[in-house]
Image (cartoon, rainbow, N blue to C red):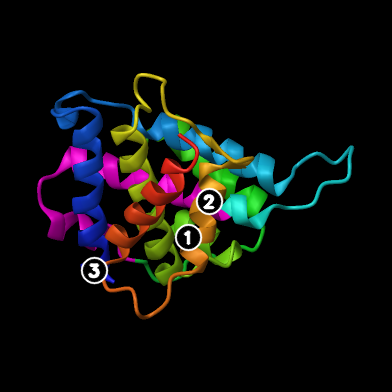
Amino acid sequence: MKAQIKEMLILQDEVNRVVTEDWKQQGYPWYRAAMVESIEMLEHFGFKWWKKQTPDMAQVQLELVDIWHFMLSHYLQQSDSLDDIADLLIAPAPENESDDLRALIDSFVGELASKQQFNTHVFYNMLSVAELSVDDLYLQYLGKNTLNRFRQHNGYKDGSYIKIWDGLEDNEVLFQILADINDSVTNTADHIYQSLTAKYQLIS
């Protein structure tokens, strides 16, 4: 797991540099971005007792992957040691495990808001409740990280990027690509990027 985390840290630094070359010096509030993603996760899971809601677990998982991006960035901004950061982010031993995702989101956001800290125990507890394994997190992270790079390379920052591809949001296209990945794929990130490029050229 440590090797996977170190790989993800390197990829996160690379995509952050595409957005802002000296991003570590900018002091970006990664905790605030994670708060927003957490609330979006709550929306997808459902919290309205006054209406019928069906949890969209695929979107819940995607929000967790987005939060992971911001967690990686937060710790990269604080340290240059990939080993030290990976040790901090390796799944900790279970601690007061809960199956109440809403309560876990409350706790996670509470610490982000009050302490500007990411609670690793709560994050992994949310992964467990959302049935997202560490290997799934790794694969989905590779996918979303690659999509983020693809967006930046195709006009996301200046507003020219097309996010809806033949009626599907690019995230949904990514899900389809990830679902088709098998053991014959040797370089997952490159495969995802090439697949995105081929599909995007059909609509742009």
Relative height, residue 169 to residue 27 (above, below): below
Q: Mark 1 points at which residue?
A: 177
Which residue: 48% across, 60% down? 177
Quarter of the image with the N terminus is bottom left
Which residue: 47% across, 63% down? 178
Which residue: 37% across, 47% down? 197
Label for residue 173?
2
Label for residue 2?
3
Main secondary structure of the magenta stretch: helix
Circles 1, 2 touching at the beta carbon (< 8 Å): yes
- Answer with the quarter of the image where residue 156 lies: top left
Which residue: 37% across, 67% down? 92
Element assignment for label 3? helix
Return the residue found at the far left.
Answer: 80
Q: Can residue 178 be seen in this view?
A: yes
Element assignment for label 2? helix
Element assignment for label 1? helix
Q: Give the range drawn in magenta.
A: 61-90
